[in-house]
Amino acid sequence: MSTMSNALQHIPFSKGVSGSIPPPGFAPRSSSTVADTRSNSLFNVMTSGKGLAQFKDIISKSDRKELQLMASLLTSDSDYFMEVVRNINGSRRVQKLLGISDAVDALFYPAILRRFYHVVTDKYASYVVIRAMLVFDQKKQYVMYEHLLHHALDIARNQYGCIALNEVITDADDPFYRNLLLDVVARNALYLSNDPSGNFVVQHVLALYDLRCTHNVGVSLHGHCVDLSFKKYGSYIVEKLLDTEESMAVVVVELLECERGRLTRLARNEFGSFVVVKALKITQGMNRVDLFRGLVQKLMPVRHLLVRSRGSNIVNFLESTI
C-alpha cells in the first residue's frame, strides 16, 4: 500500500471524489459511501489543526505520482475544492502543494479558474491565487491575468479581493500585464476612490511610485481632489498624489481654484486639514514658489478661522513663514 494511502487512514484511492461535500465540522453518516469517507478523511487532513502533522508526513514521504493523485482528489469537485481553500488551514496546505510539479499545477489550475472570482475574493482562498501567480508557468499566469483583468473592478471593490489584487500587482513580473492592471485602476480611479475597498487599490498603486500610473490617476481625479479630501480614505489618496511633482500640481491648482469659503471648510475639516498642510509643505520643499505663495496668500486672510479647529496645524505652519 502506498505512503499516501497509509497516511490517509488506509483508505484506497480511486478515480473521482464524491459529490457529497463535507463542510467544516461535518460528521459522516453511518451510511456514507467509501468515496464519502475518503473525501472526509482528506478534508480533515487538509483543514483540521490536528491534520498538520499528517499533511507534512504526506508531503515528505509521497512521490510525485502520489501527490498528483492527492491533487486530483482535491480538485475533482469544485464545491469540495472551495470548502478546502476557504478554510485557513486548507488554504495554507494547498499553497504548499502549488509549484511541487507541473502535473500537480495542471490539476489545481483549472480548479482555480472554474471558480476564479469566488476564490480570489475569499478571505483565505485568495492566497491560493496569489501563490499560484508566483509559481505557475507563464502560459497559466497569462490566462489568470486575463481573468484578473476581466473581473478587476469587482475584485478591487471586494474587501478581500482588493488585498489579493494589490499583492498580484506588487508581485507581477510581466510588464505588459502589470501595466494593463495599473491602467484599469488608473482609468477607474474616481470610481474606486469612492469605494470602501477600491480606495485601497488606488492608494496601493500610487505607493508604487510608477510615474506613468500616477500621472494617469491624476488625470482621472482631476477636478475631484477637493471633494475627495473631505473624506477619510479619499484624503489619503490626495496626499499620495502630492508626493509626485506632476500630480502634485494637479491637486494644488485645484486647491487654488476652489472658492475661498470652500478652501476654508476644507482646512477646518478633520481629513482635509492634512491635505492642505501637506500641500503647503510639499510646494515649499519642491521650491514651487508660485504654488506655495498662492496657497499662503489664499489662506492667510482666513487663518483666524482655523485656530480653534482641525486647521490649527495649518495656522502654525503659516505663522512660521511670516
Image (cartoon, rainbow, N blue to C red):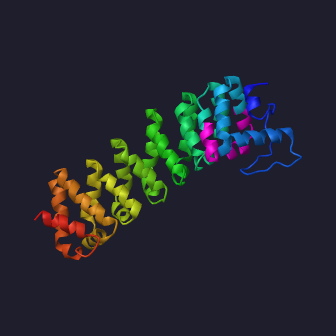
The span shown in magenta is 71-94
Q: Is residue 77 magenta?
A: yes
Q: Which of the two residues, 10 or 248, is positioned nearer the viewer here?
A: 10
Residue 287, percent across and down? Answer: 16, 51
* Residue located at (62% from left, 44% from top): 89
Q: Choose between 94 and 194: the one closer to the eye.
A: 94
Q: Residue at x 36, y 60 (%)?
A: 235
Q: Depth check: give the residue in front, 1 or 133.
A: 1
Name the residue at 38% across, 62% down. 228
Image quadrant holding the C terminus, namely: bottom left
* Position of residue 213 in the picture relative to residue 263 (left or right): right
Residue 110 visible in the snapshot: no
Q: Main secondary structure of the magenta part?
A: helix
Q: Is residue 58 visible?
A: yes
Q: Quadrant of residue 224?
A: bottom left
Q: Position of residue 296 (x, y in %)?
A: 17, 64
**Above/below status of 145 relative to 260:** above
Name the residue nearer the viewer: 46 or 98.
46
User: Outermost residue toward the left?
Assistant: 322
Residue 8 shown in magenta: no
The residue at the point 45 percent across, 60 percent down is 194
Q: Split into 4 quadrants, where in the image is the N terminus?
A: top right
Counting from the top left corner in percent of width and height, residue 174 is at 46, 32
